[in-house]
Image (cartoon, rainbow, N blue to C red):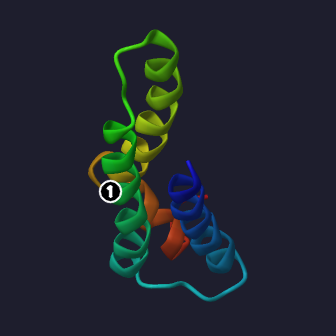
Amino acid sequence: MTLATFGWGLIWAALASSKLGWTPPVDWVYLAAMAPGILGLVYAFLTIRARRTWLFMAVVAVFANGSLVALPFLFDAEFRAVLQGTLQ
């Protein structure tokens, strides 16, 4: 979850900086955010145990990191439009 929080923090920092007038390159934001997301996804799958409690704990991290990794594939056009200021 720490890696997902770091990755989502980078995404939100990029969105906030675009509102302040400086827009980072979208591909760099994706790369910087997906690296901890992929690593966190691997860690989350490695922590799954046979017991139900471990599964419930690990599924939160799987979804948090999975959504971070899926962001460029699901919302690329919208994310680029927000960073470039064309979507209000």
| Left or right side of 21 for 26 | left
- Quarter the C terminus occupies: bottom right
Please name whichever residue, 69 or 18, is drawn nearer the observer in this view of the structure: 69
Q: How many marks?
A: 1
Residue 86 x/y as whole percent: 51, 67
> From this viewpoint, is residue 70 visible?
no
Q: Quadrant of residue 21?
A: bottom right
Q: Nearer the viewer, residue 76 or 37?
A: 37
Is 76 left or right of 16, judged from the image as shown? left
Q: Looking at the image, is 10 positioned above or below residue 78?
A: below
Query: Residue 24: where, in percent of width, then height?
Result: 50, 85
Identity of the residue drawn at 41% across and 84% down: 25
Give the x, y percent position of residue 16.
68, 71
What residue occupies the far bottom of the structure in this picture?
22
Name the foreground residue: 23 vs 33. 33
- Please state which amino acid type lies under the numbered disc 1: Ile
Q: Residue furthest top?
A: 52
Q: Which residue is mark 1?
A: 38
Q: Residues within 10 Å of mark 1 (few under 14, many from 20)?
A: some
Q: Nearer the viewer, residue 71 or 42?
A: 42
Q: Residue at x 55, y 72 (%)?
A: 85
Mark 1 secondary-structure assignment: helix
Q: Compared to 42, does 20 lie above or below?
A: below
Identify whether 13 is placed above or below 64: below
| Residue at image coords 53%, 26% | 57
Q: Is residue 80 in sight in this rendering?
A: yes
The x and y percentages for residue 49 are 36, 24
